[in-house]
Image (cartoon, rainbow, N blue to C red):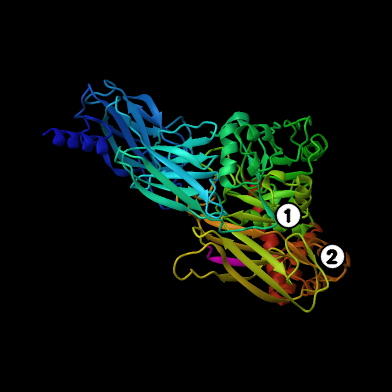
């Protein structure tokens, strides 16, 4: 009998987490759709949905303590949890699948009490969410609710522990609460633990869990299912990560990094940020808190993670007319005046006051303080015309921001290529804009800079900055795309001494857990060739996903070539790709991306690169009749034709003019395409500027 009682007690502890465990009280067994705002956020949700969920609970014992458990999905805005109309807590601000738990002391609940979940505040932003599997579980506050799992993650090649991220899920694949707290070696959130040492005693609920180990884009994923119900131990877990995407000669850089400590929003403290940087394998992090100069180095040294990266001081120069990341900034430099709103003064301040060599235009398609720098109200995206005459003196721009993704994944990349066509030397950038420990992953969007990478703690920062400004970069958001011309010219190079045929080798790489399905080759921004990347036969492997050499006729004029690859968005919670930040469409298109830097072809053999705009100006300055102008465009491409159309329009020409339409009717398809693209973009700008 004594053995039977002991067994029953063990079963209660194992499955209920309390010595008097009872079956959970189901409050809402189903997943329920709720909506804030007037319009549907995504087409995957129903046309309409209630604004709140509410239910009375019964069958409670006032002498028992309870855990309120809620499953939540797709939460982007603030949602409150209320008990009898009074705040009890909030849902977790994270679009991934989470299990939210709130501890309720004995006497907190009574029969007939009302639970409610509703949007917090009076915001009208659209947010479609799902909540459900809501239950109340009795618990005994005297019983330890956690099971300890001694966990070590090692580098497979060396056998040594390495910084990493651990993601812990329940049987429903929800991120679950843990007993760990952030400290000098850990950064902890629901279902997520970053460890600076590769070691941690995980405190998990007494239930089956799955534990994943990751270390950013370059490494494999390892995982184990752990039946953590048995309290007798010890529970020991050893995981190994393999480097699957070696990137020799490049350093992994994130140019857009925030902390709660110094930016005042998000949730990552300065210490947690140091640990997450090490855990995601970022070798050259740029500190860019808003309008302040922060040096990561003393914090990284204090926490013991300085061997893993070389920190650089920067600043997100945050004005009402745009946001710009500046670096490197030396000690004692004055912070730029964020009250400026004139771009001429902004750039003079950015370079002159701080001494920074790099000025990145951030998230140019996003709306901040009423300004969307590359929206149609201010920018013609075909010919890179700033409609208010603002000078475009930034020398880099974000083409991927993993914390502020776009509905059209390649839209910013096309904007960048339009700037190249206009004649601006601008480096493409991938960044994370992360303010958080786990919601938006630091380094998920990243820039690989060509420079020595043998010791991440001793990166030559001036050399890296010089390479960056030359465009010797690769931009990654889950994929890495390299372009090599004639076996020697790569990103940032001007390819000279070419024959009649050029060979373009494109290589797409990714770890085993990320898929690529399409590759494109862009010439002066236009797609000239593309291919589907077939799914691998058998188990997916990390490294090169696709490699092929394409032969192209050498153009007679200078052009820039860019290769891009894309693949399905990542739904796995250990590295989930974010939904669009300010969606322009309810159609959800989450994609991974890899974009090469530009390789220029010296098509006219004059030893220098000439942009599409330069050729258009030469054609227009000839002053010949319109028929001859269109004829001159025949030997060029659509990008040059668009710039000729712009010059024609600026001189008073109309798209509807009979002379132009007659000429275009006889012109080559790429000439018609170029003129049509410019005037379509112009009409879009006029509509935007006329709108209230």
Label 2 neighbour load within 10 Å: few <14, some 14-19, many 20+: many
Secondary structure under tag 1 reads loop
Quadrant position of residue 501:
bottom right
Where's residue 437, x and y in %? 53, 38
In this image, 464 relative to 189: left or right?
right
Nearer to the camera, 357 or 378? 357
Quarter of the figure with the C terminus: top right
Q: Position of residue 251 (x, y in %)?
A: 68, 51
Q: Secondary structure at mark 2?
A: helix
Query: Which residue position is annotated with label 1?
Result: 384
Residue closest to the far bottom: 500
Q: Is residue 517 magenta?
A: yes
Numbered tag placed on residue 620 in the rendering: 2
The N terminus lies in which quarter of the figure? top left
State which tag comes first along the sequence, 2 or 1.
Answer: 1
Q: Looking at the rendering, which quadrant does residue 416 occupy?
A: bottom right
Judge the density around disc 1: few (<14), some (14-19), many (≥20) Cα neighbours within 10 Å: many
Across and down, in percent, residue 129 comes to: 40, 43
Asked if the residue under mark 1 is in contact with the one under mark 2, i.e. CB atoms within 8 Å, the reply is no
Range drawn in magenta: 516-520
Q: Estimate the x, y position of residue 518 in percent, counting from the top left.
A: 56, 66
Magenta-highlighted stretch: main secondary structure?
strand
Q: Nearer the viewer, residue 389 or 541?
A: 541
């Amino acid at each position: 009998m004594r053995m039977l009682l002991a067994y029953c007690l063990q079963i209660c502890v194992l499955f209920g987490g309390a010595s008097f465990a009872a079956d959970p009280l189901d409050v809402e067994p189903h997943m329920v759709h709720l909506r804030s705002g007037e319009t549907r956020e995504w087409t995957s949700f129903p046309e309409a949905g209630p604004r709140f969920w509410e239910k009375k609970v019964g069958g409670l014992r006032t002498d028992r303590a309870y855990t309120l458990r809620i499953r939540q999905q797709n939460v982007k805005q603030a949602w409150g949890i209320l008990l009898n109309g009074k705040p009890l807590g909030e849902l977790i601000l994270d679009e991934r699948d989470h299990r939210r738990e709130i501890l309720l002391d004995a006497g907190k609940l009574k029969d007939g009490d009302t639970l409610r979940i509703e949007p917090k505040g009076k915001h009208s932003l659209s947010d479609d969410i799902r909540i459900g599997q809501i239950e109340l579980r009795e618990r005994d506050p005297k019983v330890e609710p956690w099971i300890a799992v001694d966990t070590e993650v090692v580098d497979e090649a060396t056998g040594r522990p390495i910084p990493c991220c651990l993601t812990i899920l329940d049987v429903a694949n929800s991120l679950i609460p843990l007993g760990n707290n952030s400290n000098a070696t850990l950064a902890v959130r629901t279902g997520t633990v970053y460890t600076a040492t590769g070691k941690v005693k995980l405190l998990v609920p007494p239930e089956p869990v799955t534990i994943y180990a990751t270390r950013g884009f370059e490494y494999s994923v390892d995982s184990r299912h752990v039946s953590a119900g048995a309290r007798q131990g010890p529970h020991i877990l050893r995981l190994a990560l393999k480097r699957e995407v070696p990137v020799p000669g490049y350093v992994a850089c994130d140019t857009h990094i925030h902390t709660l400590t110094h930016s005042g929003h998000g949730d990552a403290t300065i210490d947690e940020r140091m640990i997450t940087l090490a855990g995601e394998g970022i070798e050259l992090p740029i500190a860019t808190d808003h309008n302040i100069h922060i040096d990561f180095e003393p914090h990284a040294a204090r926490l013991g993670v300085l061997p893993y990266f070389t920190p650089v001081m920067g600043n997100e120069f945050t004005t009402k007319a745009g946001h710009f990341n500046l670096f490197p900034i030396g000690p004692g430099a004055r912070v730029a005046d964020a009250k400026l709103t004139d771009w001429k003064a902004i750039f003079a301040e950015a370079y002159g006051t701080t001494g920074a060599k790099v000025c990145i235009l951030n998230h140019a398609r996003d709306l901040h303080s009423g300004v969307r720098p590359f929206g149609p109200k201010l920018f013609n995206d075909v010919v890179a015309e700033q409609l208010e005459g603002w000078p475009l003196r930034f020398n880099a721009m974000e083409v991927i921001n993993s914390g502020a993704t776009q509905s059209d994944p390649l839209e910013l990349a096309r904007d960048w290529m339009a700037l190249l066509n206009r004649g601006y030397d601008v480096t493409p950038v991938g960044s994370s804009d992360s303010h958080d420990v786990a919601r938006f992953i630091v380094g998920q969007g990243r820039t690989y800079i060509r420079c020595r990478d043998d010791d991440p703690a001793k990166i030559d920062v001036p050399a890296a900055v010089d390479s960056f400004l030359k465009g010797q970069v690769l931009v990654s958001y889950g994929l890495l795309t390299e372009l090599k011309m004639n076996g020697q010219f790569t990103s940032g190079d001007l390819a000279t001494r070419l024959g009649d045929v050029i060979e373009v080798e494109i290589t797409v790489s990714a770890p085993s857990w990320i898929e690529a399905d399409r590759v494109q080759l862009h010439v002066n921004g236009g797609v000239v060739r593309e291919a589907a990347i077939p799914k691998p036969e058998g188990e997916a492997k990390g490294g090169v996903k696709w490699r092929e050499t394409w032969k192209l006729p050498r153009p007679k004029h200078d052009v820039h070539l860019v290769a891009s690859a894309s693949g399905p968005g990542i739904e796995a919670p250990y590295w989930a790709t974010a939904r669009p930040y300010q969606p322009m469409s309810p159609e959800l298109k989450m994609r991974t991306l890899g974009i090469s830097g530009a390789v220029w072809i010296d098509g006219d053999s004059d030893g220098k690169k000439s942009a599409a705009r330069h050729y258009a100006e030469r054609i227009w300055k000839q002053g010949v009749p319109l028929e001859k102008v269109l004829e001159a465009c025949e030997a060029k491409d659509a990008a040059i034709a668009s710039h000729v159309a712009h010059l024609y329009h600026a001189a008073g020409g109309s798209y509807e003019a009979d002379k132009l339409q007659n000429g275009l009717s006889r012109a080559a398809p790429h000439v018609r395409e170029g003129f049509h693209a410019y005037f379509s973009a112009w009409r879009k700008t006029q509509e935007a500027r006329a709108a209230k």
